Image (cartoon, rainbow, N blue to C red):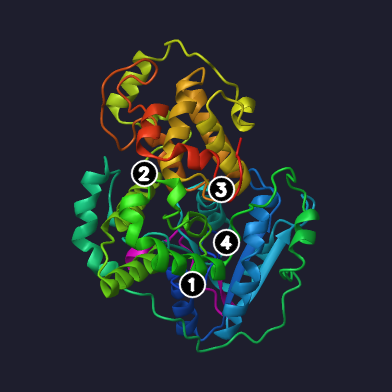
């Protein structure tokens, strides 16, 4: 566990405190949560109860109905699971900008220590830099997102082939379930006045009361919460794992796990998914290497980049060859060139690209293989390479339930050559990999994606 824990200030545990405080920023779950387990162990050592705090503010970037709804759909289930094992729960919903913005500090004033999530992207990075400086108690950040802890690596890895042997060398050490939490001292205090009671029935009303962007509606495909994550994992194991290797790049086959939104929002952990996949594959004599490669090697390569690389809104984190070839082709003619608004509204001449964008607008997720095509075409049709990067990040930050994630940012930069190799040279892309509509038609059933029988036309 110590390899997962970073103490981000030099404060000492407060004597006479009422509880240990766990701040759930990214890992919104009870099970398989190293951070919550560390907090519980700390509480048990001190003879204190444990309080689980989750906040949802109206001021995070691109706050909208889609993200708010997905998050709120998980709150009630988390509270029930916490209550069963004797952990207190506070969910604070900051609806308007003039509502108090100090809930964490109020709760921390009665805590012996704060434990939170070590996460290398989005607002958790900012919080973990600034908040510890304002506390008089210890502030621990715990890596509950990766199977092999991020701290195991000392620098940015160049590509999958460099990180894969390093992961495989130690993977067995970390592929063990997180033990269930047992609390010595149960939570028995009154519900905090900060707490917002969330039920399935009142979620639409709560969302409507929030000062957020109401133009981006909830996903029609994905519901939030631990129970839904478990259901999707079960469906994947029983229906899709056996055909994943052969058909995962075929959107019409529906053979992927669709767990990325739940991994991003912490409703399920990559560790428990990997363990479940390995167990099911062994029991049913299936081959799961292709899926585990994506879940472990590729995903943790992305977290490695987020931890050690530059911010994802710059092309400066690309390998030297990619930066050089893009500079060489920076002034190449583009035809057509679309504006960000045209991209956002899916108004290009390409029916397949429009379908991928409308999947994002409707569901909050694009099929992984087609998302590569989506990104490559934005590069081809943007005024500059930086404009293309800005557009991809903007659209994911605004609409994607699996956006604002190390995996997403890395996948976007892959379109520009990150974690890839040089290919044959061509306009605009230089030696960065290119993808064509003709290639997609050869490799996938484009027609079934554009006009799926269960949904009608996406155009």
Give the mark nearer the N terminus: 3 vs 4.
4
Label 3 CA crowd tier, 10 Å (few <14, some 14–19, many 20+): few
Label 1 CA crowd tier, 10 Å (few <14, some 14–19, many 20+): many
Give the mark nearer the N terminus: 2 vs 4.
4
Label 2 CA crowd tier, 10 Å (few <14, some 14–19, many 20+): many
**Residue 234 appears in the picture as rendered:** yes
Residue 135 badge: 4
Q: Which residue is drawn at 36% across and 62% down?
A: 241
Q: Quadrant of the rendered structure where residue 411 is?
A: top left
Q: What stretch is highlighted in magenta?
A: 1-21
Say if mark 3 contacts mark 1, CB within 8 Å: no
Viewer-closest of 150 and 383: 383
Q: What element carries label 4?
A: loop
Decide if residue 361 is on the left or right side of residue 369.
right
Q: Is mark 3 on a helix, strand or loop?
A: loop
> How many numbered circles are shown?
4
Q: Residue at x 30, y 43 (%)?
A: 156
Q: In which quarter of the image is the N terminus?
A: bottom left
Residue that mark 1 sits on: 36
Give the mark nearer the N terminus: 1 vs 4.
1
Q: Mark 3 or mark 1, which is nearer to you?
A: 3
Residue that mark 2 sits on: 305
Residue that mark 3 sits on: 453
Q: Mark 3 or mark 4, which is nearer to you?
A: 3
Q: Mark 2 or mark 4, which is nearer to you?
A: 2
Give the mark nearer the N terminus: 3 vs 1.
1
Q: Is mark 2 on a helix, strand or loop?
A: helix
Task: Using the numbered discs, state the Cα–Cα distance from disc 3 to disc 1 in whole angstroms.
Answer: 44 Å
Across and down, in percent, residue 169 comes to 18, 60
């Amino acid at each position: 566990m110590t390899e997962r824990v970073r103490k981000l200030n030099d404060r000492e545990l407060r004597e006479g405190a009422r509880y240990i405080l766990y701040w759930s920023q990214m890992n919104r779950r009870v099970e398989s949560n190293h951070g919550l387990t560390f907090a519980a162990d700390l509480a048990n050592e001190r003879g204190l109860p444990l309080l689980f705090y989750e906040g949802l503010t109206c001021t995070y970037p691109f706050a909208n109905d889609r993200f708010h709804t997905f998050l709120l759909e998980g709150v009630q289930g988390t509270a029930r699971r916490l209550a069963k094992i004797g952990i207190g729960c506070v969910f604070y919903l900051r609806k308007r900008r003039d509502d108090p913005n100090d809930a964490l500090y109020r709760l921390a004033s009665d805590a012996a220590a704060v434990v939170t999530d070590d996460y290398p992207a989005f607002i958790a990075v900012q919080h973990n830099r600034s908040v510890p400086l304002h506390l008089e108690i210890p502030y621990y950040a715990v890596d509950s997102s990766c199977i092999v802890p991020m701290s195991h690596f000392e620098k940015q890895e160049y590509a999958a082939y460099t990180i894969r042997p390093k992961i495989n060398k130690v993977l067995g050490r970390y592929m063990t379930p997180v033990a269930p939490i047992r609390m010595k001292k149960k939570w028995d205090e009154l519900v905090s006045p900060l707490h917002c009671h969330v039920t399935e029935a009142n979620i639409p009303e709560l969302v409507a009361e929030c000062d957020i962007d109401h133009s981006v509606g909830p996903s029609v495909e994905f519901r939030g919460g631990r129970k839904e994550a478990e259901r999707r994992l079960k469906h994947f194991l029983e229906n899709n794992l056996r055909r994943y290797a052969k058909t995962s790049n075929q959107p019409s086959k529906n053979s992927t796990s669709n767990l990325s939104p739940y991994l991003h929002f912490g409703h399920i952990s990559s560790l428990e998914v990997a363990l479940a996949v390995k167990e099911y594959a062994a029991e049913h004599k299936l081959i799961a290497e292709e899926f585990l490669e994506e879940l472990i090697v590729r995903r943790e390569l992305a977290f490695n980049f987020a931890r050690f690389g530059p911010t994802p809104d710059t092309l400066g984190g690309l390998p030297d060859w990619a930066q050089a070839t893009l500079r060489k082709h920076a002034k190449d003619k583009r035809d057509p060139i679309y504006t960000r608004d045209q991209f956002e509204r899916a108004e290009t001449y390409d029916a397949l690209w429009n379908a991928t964008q409308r999947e994002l607008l409707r569901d909050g997720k694009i099929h992984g293989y087609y998302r590569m095509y989506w990104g490559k075409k934005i590069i081809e049709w943007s005024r500059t390479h930086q404009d293309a990067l800005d557009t991809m990040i903007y659209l994911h930050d605004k609409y994607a339930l699996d956006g604002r994630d190390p995996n997403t940012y890395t996948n976007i930069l892959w379109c520009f050559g990150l974690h890839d190799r040089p290919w044959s040279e061509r306009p605009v892309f230089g030696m960065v990999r290119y993808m064509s509509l003709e290639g997609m038609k050869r490799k996938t059933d484009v027609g079934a994606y554009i006009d799926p029988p269960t949904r009608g036309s996406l155009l």
